[in-house]
Image: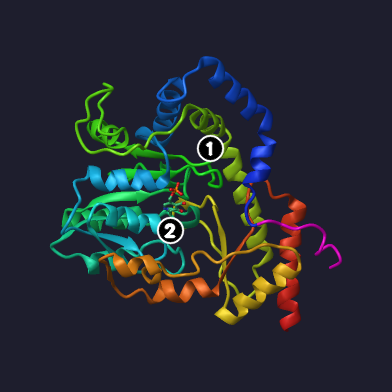
């Protein structure tokens, strides 16, 4: 075990990734500077065309995943007096986007094995005021879109996919973002596909939605500079980020395969341990933005994290504070259904380092350290 303390294994690897792409990024930045077009140019158009074609819809680049979600909610005409069902286990932006439109987020529970929104909980939470549901493809695995679509169709609800963590994920060959009414991606630098800082993308199969989505993210403009048709946001992406993300879009399939290979290494290695391991589910292919390992109870998870930390391995719990219990929610009208599974699962979970840039040696160190922890306990 003397290898365990050699070098830190970080929880996030985007600095390593961007450094690895440095020459390409510098060339792309130089090209944009030489062209002298920083917004709304050919790189944005090319990213939109390619992402739309590959993921099965029409794409619009925006400034962040949060902006994508806020825009989707507004574009569907959701506002005061409406309710939108969201999972209790998600990043704040999913619920903030609902609140930003003046609507009420309704928190429901997750499926314990996939951690994505439980379609039965969605059905149980519907009221006459419910307008939409936002399944979150958490950790890189798509929610059960077939079941959610069925509930949504029964009750006449719109479906907004939160694909912030799931660029490139599929369900029986259909891409994240192409199965609901509008898909919302984050292209923050640390995501599976990201630019240099923040970015996002909207995807819709219905081209008739594009003009409003565009206006809502360009200060209400419709291509002409001085007329503002609706109250819109400053929500655009820049050409440099578009160029970098377009470059990485070609690398995404290989990166996803690498994430899956690291996950398979973990999953095989932990077969005999008293833990629950993530994986593909019923045709839904995991892209492993995170690798959540679920232990028997919170005390075991805390000791495992401490043990891995002593071995120089950074881990995290996602999200340590339940979203309905975040201080900000005190001022936001919302409703909370039964969320026992969400509250139970996170304190028992340890997310292990995973990234295309993680080496086999580093993955083996993680495996050794997790095994050492379990042998010390027996
Ligand atoms: C599930 C989820 N939704 C929304 C967002 C918001 O995206 P962004 O940080 O790009 O605004 C994120 C990521 O940060 C996320 O993980």
- Residue 187, image x and y in percent? 48, 42
Q: Residue furthest top?
A: 35
Q: Residue 40, how many percent across, how many down?
A: 40, 24
In the picture, the quarter occupied by the C terminus is bottom right
Residue 102 appears in the picture as rendered: yes
Q: Is residue 182 above or below residue 95?
A: above
Most extreme residue toward the left is 128
- The count of marks equals 2
Provide the residue span drawn in magenta: 1-10
Please state which of residues 339 and 99 is positioned toward the viewer in this rendering: 99
Whether residue 172 can be seen here: no
| Image quadrant where residue 185 sits | top left
Residue 91, labelled with which disc? 2
The quarter of the rendered structure image containing the N terminus is: bottom right
Q: Earlier in the sequence, mark 2 or mark 1?
A: 2
Look at 13% across and 62% down and name the residue there. Answer: 128
Secondary structure of residue under mark 1? loop
Mark pair 2, 1: CA separation: 20 Å
Callout 2: helix, strand or loop?
A: loop
Residue picked out by circle 1: 195
Q: Is residue 145 left or right of residue 295?
A: left
**Is 199 situated above or below 92?**
above
Disc 2 residue crowd, few under 14, some 14–19, many 20+, Cα 10 Å: some
SS majority, magenta: loop
Name the residue located 19 percent from the left edge and 31 percent from the top edge: 229
Question: In the image, is residue 5 part of the stretch drawn in magenta?
Answer: yes
């Amino acid at each position: 075990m003397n290898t365990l303390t050699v070098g830190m294994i970080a929880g996030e690897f985007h600095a390593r990734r961007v450094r690895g792409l440095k020459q390409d990024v510098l060339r792309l930045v130089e090209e944009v500077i030489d062209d002298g077009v920083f917004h709304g140019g050919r790189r944005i158009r090319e990213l939109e065309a390619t992402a739309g074609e590959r993921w099965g819809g029409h794409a619009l680049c925006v400034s962040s995943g949060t902006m994508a979600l806020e825009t989707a909610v507004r574009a569907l005409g959701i506002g005061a007096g409406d309710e939108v069902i969201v999972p209790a286990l998600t990043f704040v932006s999913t619920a903030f986007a609902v609140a930003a439109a003046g609507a009420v987020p309704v928190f429901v529970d997750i499926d314990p094995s996939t951690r994505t929104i439980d379609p039965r909980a969605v059905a149980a939470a519907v009221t006459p005021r419910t307008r939409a549901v936002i399944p979150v493809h958490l950790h890189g695995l798509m929610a059960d879109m077939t079941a959610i679509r069925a509930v949504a169709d029964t009750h006449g609800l719109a479906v907004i996919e939160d694909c912030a963590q799931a660029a490139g994920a599929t369900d029986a060959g259909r891409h994240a973002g192409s199965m609901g009414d509008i898909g919302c991606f984050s292209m923050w630098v640390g995501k599976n596909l990201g630019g240099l800082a923040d970015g996002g993308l909207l995807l819709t199969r219905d081209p008739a939605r594009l003009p409003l989505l565009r206006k809502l993210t360009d200060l209400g403009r419709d291509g002409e500079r001085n007329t503002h048709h609706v109250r819109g946001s400053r929500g655009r992406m820049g050409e440099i980020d578009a160029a970098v993300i377009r470059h990485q879009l070609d690398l995404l399939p290989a990166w996803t395969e690498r994430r899956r290979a690291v996950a398979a290494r973990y999953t095989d290695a932990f077969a005999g341990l008293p833990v629950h391991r993530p994986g593909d589910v019923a045709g839904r292919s995991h892209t492993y933005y995170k690798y959540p390992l679920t232990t028997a109870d919170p005390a075991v998870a805390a000791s495992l994290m401490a043990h891995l930390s002593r071995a120089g391995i950074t881990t995290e719990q996602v999200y340590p504070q339940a979203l309905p219990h975040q201080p900000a929610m005190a001022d936001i009208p919302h409703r909370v259904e039964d969320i026992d599974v969400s509250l139970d699962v996170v304190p028992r979970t340890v997310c292990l380092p995973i990234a295309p840039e993680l080496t086999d040696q580093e993955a083996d160190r993680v495996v050794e350290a997790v095994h050492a922890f379990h042998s010390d306990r027996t």
